[in-house]
Image (spheres, rainbow, N blue to C red):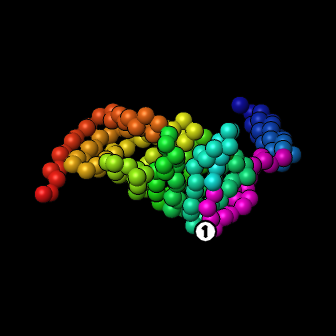
Amino acid sequence: MSWRAVVILLLSLGALAAGWAVWQQQRPPPQVETTDTRPDYVLQDFELTALDGEGKESFTLRAPQLERRPDDDTMSLVTPLFLIPDAEGQHWEIRSKQGWVSADQEEIRLSGEVKANSPSATVRPVTMNTESLKVFPRRNHAETDDVVTIVQPGSILSGRGFAVSTATKRYVFRSEVNTRYVPARR
């Protein structure tokens, strides 16, 4: 190859590189979408009663802090206490470290040391413990995939995966079910 061919090849490569560099400088930088994750309001030390479409109590909520996200209208909670009425109008008390409420208030997600106590007027009081729980107050339904322990007078029942209807008072464990009978003291 002659020296002229080498020079022409080098000049052509230089022209291509310069053209590419100019083209890159003319393209606008990519847009980075930013979402404002700040809440549009914060409630502290409050009590809130949510009503269903018929004007009946869906649930009552007490917590030291609630933050509402403006982008999806969901609410996050710190150490919430939910009072959820059953079919007779008695209230289940459900506590956890954290909570989340959907925009339409159809779903409540509780996480961190979730503890549910049956209404105080119940003949056989029930205490339920788990790490997470999804509650659907308008459907009178709650469920979790985590381990659940249910303590009643005379028995301790545990299992993985759980669903309960507060209307019918029936519950189902999906797997790893264990029962322990505790005799009453005389």
Quadrant housing the N terminus:
top right
How many marks overall?
1
Q: Measured along the vertical axis of the image, is residue 41 above or below residue 58?
A: below
Q: Quadrant of residue 53?
A: top right
Residue farthest to the top, as pictured: 1
Residue 44 magenta-highlighted: yes
Q: Can residue 139 be seen in this view?
A: yes
Tag 1: amino acid: Asp
Q: Residue at x 25, y 50 (%)?
A: 153
- 128 relative position to 153: left or right: right
| Whole-percent x, y for residue 176 in the image | 26, 37
- 145 relative position to 34: left or right: left
Residue farthest to the left, as pictured: 186
Q: Nearer the viewer, residue 32 or 4?
A: 32
Quadrant housing the C terminus:
bottom left
- 116 relative position to 31: left or right: left
| Whole-percent x, y for residue 63 in the image | 56, 63
Q: Which residue is label 1 attached to?
A: 45
Mark 1 surroundings within 10 Å by alpha-carbon count, few (fewer than 14), some (14 through 19), many (20 or more):
few
| Whole-percent x, y for residue 47 in the image | 61, 61
Residues rendered magenta in the picture: 28-48
Name the main secondary structure of what is drawn in magenta: loop
Q: Which of 184 and 130 is in front in this view?
A: 184
Q: Tell me the element at label 1.
A: strand
Q: Which residue is drawn at 63% across and 57% down?
A: 48
Residue 39 magenta-highlighted: yes
Q: Is residue 149 visible?
A: no
Q: In which quarter of the image is residue 113?
A: bottom left
| Whole-percent x, y for residue 64 in the image | 57, 67
Q: Nearer the viewer, residue 124 or 164?
A: 124
Q: Residue at x 32, y 40 (%)?
A: 160
